[in-house]
Image (cartoon, rainbow, N blue to C red):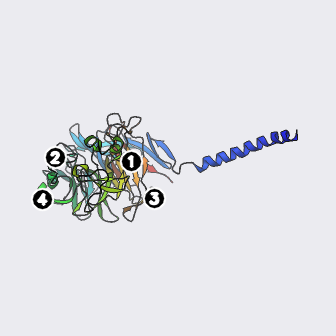
Amino acid sequence: MKIKRLQILLLPLCAIIGLIAFNAFKKAHVPTTVYNVNAGLTIPAGFSAVAVAEQVGNARHIVVTPENDIYVHLAGTKNGKGILVLHVNGDKATLKSSFANYGGTGIAIKNGYLYASNDKDVYRYKLNEKNEVINPDQPETIVTGLLSRRAHEAKAFCLDNNGNIYVNIGAYSNICSEFDHDRKGCPILDSAGGIWQFKADKSNQHYGDGIRYATGLRNVVGLAWNQQDNQLFVMQHGRDALHDLFPNLYTVHQSAELPAECMFALKNGDNAGWPYVYYDWIQHKNMLGPEYGGDGKKAADPKFIEPVAAYPGHYAPNGLLFYTGNQFPEKYKNGAFIAFHGSWNRAPEPQAGYCVVFQPFKNGKPDGKWEVFADGFAGANKSPGGAAHRPCGLAQGPDGSLYVSDDQKGTIYKITYKK
């Protein structure tokens, strides 16, 4: 009888102890990063996001002036114009003007000029003291006659601090197999599949006047100049169809994850290895491509450079930005934001990307694991045709805010942080 009474008395006490233990377990397993939702985006706690503009057109790369004007380069033209000028006032942007009878991707401001490209040429426009284009109908042609054939035509670019401009000349092929039948060497690398360097202040340069700065790069849409170590960084779109072309060597799951999307730090003369090499982010090494005798296990020739950071396959990196502002927490200073446009070919795995990620840096080099910074652009349907929005371009505002362009529905997002 005494034992039963003791058991009855102990039951509530055990329940209380159990509840305390359960709550302690839950607190110990709360994720370290807490996210909130703004403008349909999932972003870290403390940040907020607004859509400052919507339905502007297929917005590719963007640049923001100290006067809070956004120059937006459209993929094509809207009402006959390919570059829009929006003015941001708080959480809204209004259209100031538009110009340029061409669409494209690349756009940047340097030393009093606005630079912009279509698929064959690079132009620049003189700016006044308010960073407004003086003669929008009379651009100066900087480079003309750039190679543009069927695929990977976007002439994304960036500028350094020494008067040079670096232009992507994408390979007009997946893996060069239709041009290199005898496997003796890809013949298109002399004119494509790399980064070409031109003078940023010299008019009417032809394609042949440029220097092939780096080669072996299938297609680069995200480029940025790293001010910490004065070096060009690029994001490469990796090859497709490992399983489709070599079903005896790669499973569909391997083909969904491989090869990596790669970040390269480039110097003059570097060779990243396309089409002979791909990077396996799971094995952490350059692999010999199957077209040239690889089997998913053979390492590549060490003469090819390796990426400084790597990400899962087919995410499609279209924007790269080094954050130099003071608004965001200290961990973001000098780190890299990457806009992943989103995959179409990761089946049977779910399609992925459609997000902006952050890559920590230290002393001008990647340091630590990357993390998803902003997600939710696509909505419920992560596919090229079904995604609500697809991030493409990145820009830093004068107050340190981060701007993201969407080339699906034409939304411009502004992401800010408050302490």
Q: Which residue is mark 3?
A: 331
The residue positioned 37% from the left and 62% from the top of the image is 365
**Marks 4/1: CA–CA distance:** 36 Å
Pointers 1 and 2 in contact (C-beta within 8 Å): no
Alpha-carbon neighbours of circle 3 within 10 Å: few (<14), some, or many (≥20)? few
The x and y percentages for residue 248 are 29, 43
Mark 3 / mark 4, whichever is N-terminal: 4
The x and y percentages for residue 284 are 36, 56
| Image-based side of 86 in relation to 39, left or right | left
Q: Is residue 190 visible?
A: yes
Q: Nearer the viewer, residue 388 or 187?
A: 187
**Marks 3/1: CA–CA distance:** 16 Å
* 147 in relation to 378, above or below: below
Q: Which residue is mark 1?
A: 356
Q: Which residue is mark 2?
A: 148
**Marks 2/4: CA–CA distance:** 17 Å
Pointers 3 and 2 in contact (C-beta within 8 Å): no
The residue positioned 85% from the left and 41% from the top of the image is 3
Q: Which amino acid, mark 4? A: Asp
The x and y percentages for residue 412 are 35, 43
Q: Which amino acid, mark 2? A: Ser
Alpha-carbon neighbours of circle 2 within 10 Å: few (<14), some, or many (≥20)? some
Q: Which amino acid, mark 1? A: Val
Mark 3 / mark 2, whichever is N-terminal: 2
